Image (cartoon, rainbow, N blue to C red):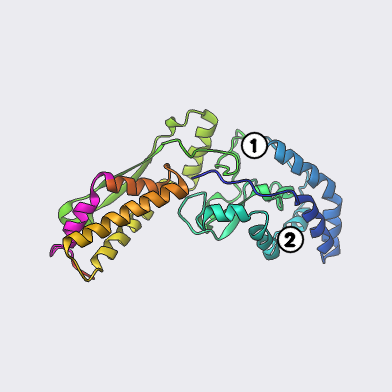
Amino acid sequence: MKKLTEPVNTEAVSMLDDMIKRKKREDYAKRLSAYRDYIVRRYTVFEKKKDILENVGSSKIVTEEDKDAIHSSFNTSFKKRMKEKELKKVYEECEGVCPYCGNGKIEEVDHYVPKENYPEFTLYPNNLIPLCNKCNKKKGDKFVDTRNERQFINFYSDCIDDIPFLNVEIDFDPTDIKRTTEVKYTADFSKILDSRLRKIVKDHYKYLDLLCRYNEAAADEISELLSVLQGQPDREKSRVKIMADGWILGKRDSQRLKAGSNDWKYLLYEKLYAIKYADELVEYVCTNKAVRK
């Protein structure tokens, strides 16, 4: 979970004006025009409060008709522009992987400050974060709790790159490694010294069910490695060992470079290397217990 480069938003106002001009529905165009100056002012508020967005204040746009007029501009054409221009650097840094979970494939764009409650930020680039479908559904319109405290990490302002709060343990029986390997992630949020950030990260993990999702994803990673090794026509032990070590170290190093040392996948491969899992896996694959499907 690495902090992302903030989107380019220098053309946010001109883009809003362009959207108003392009409106085919006259009633939508009138509603957007009526709120144009208010939306621009709210962009300024967002920028000033970007590190404490929970204090951005409530919206004055409350009727469903007014919301629909603004929401209608968040269409396929707008999303394409975001991906190619304002959010281009963000998409490049994500490399197709959802920043909210660090695992899912990016398929959608999230309004960090929900557009349902804050329609004025529907088209504001700094309010848009690419993410996977599963995270988008789990996050929904959540933003702040009953105490007005944020519930999710903002990857444009919150930084947790170097805080080692995530841990993984791997248990297995070497005589039947395929069936017995179990992975369990835990999080020690007390290592996040900033109490405000600690609460945000804890809620983020809770509402997105990340620890359980990491357990499942890690099991898939190990299963894939086992399948690759079992699929090798030459099961000479030294060759299989070289392949297994190369796989684990390659994944570990590339993942750290891409996502940092607090990333679930980096931690998985670092643990596999530390416990010499490859040695046991190679022994398993190169004996009669390793049966090909």
Residue segment shown in magenta: 274-290
Q: Is residue 291 left or right of residue 156?
A: left
Residue 130 image point, x, y percent: 58, 54
**What is the C-alpha distance between the residues marked 1 and 2?**
25 Å
Residue identifier under label 2: 72
Q: Is residue 96 above or below residue 144?
A: below
Q: Amino acid at mark 1?
A: Glu
Residue at point 60%, 33% (across, down): 147
Image side of residue 239 versus residue 218, left or right = left
| Image quadrant where one finds the C terminus | bottom left
In the rendered image, residue 160, in percent from the top left (x then y), is placed at 50, 38
Q: Quadrant of residue 260?
A: top left
53 and 279: which is toward the camera: 279
Q: Quadrant of residue 109?
A: bottom right
Tell me the amino acid under the disc marked 2.
Answer: Ser
Mark 1 Cα-neighbour bin, 10 Å: few <14, some 14–19, many ≥20: some
Q: Is residue 209 visible?
A: no
Q: Is residue 86 visible?
A: yes
Eyeballing the image, is 226 above or below 202? Answer: below
The residue that mark 1 highlights is 54
> Is 155 placed left or right of 192 in the picture?
right
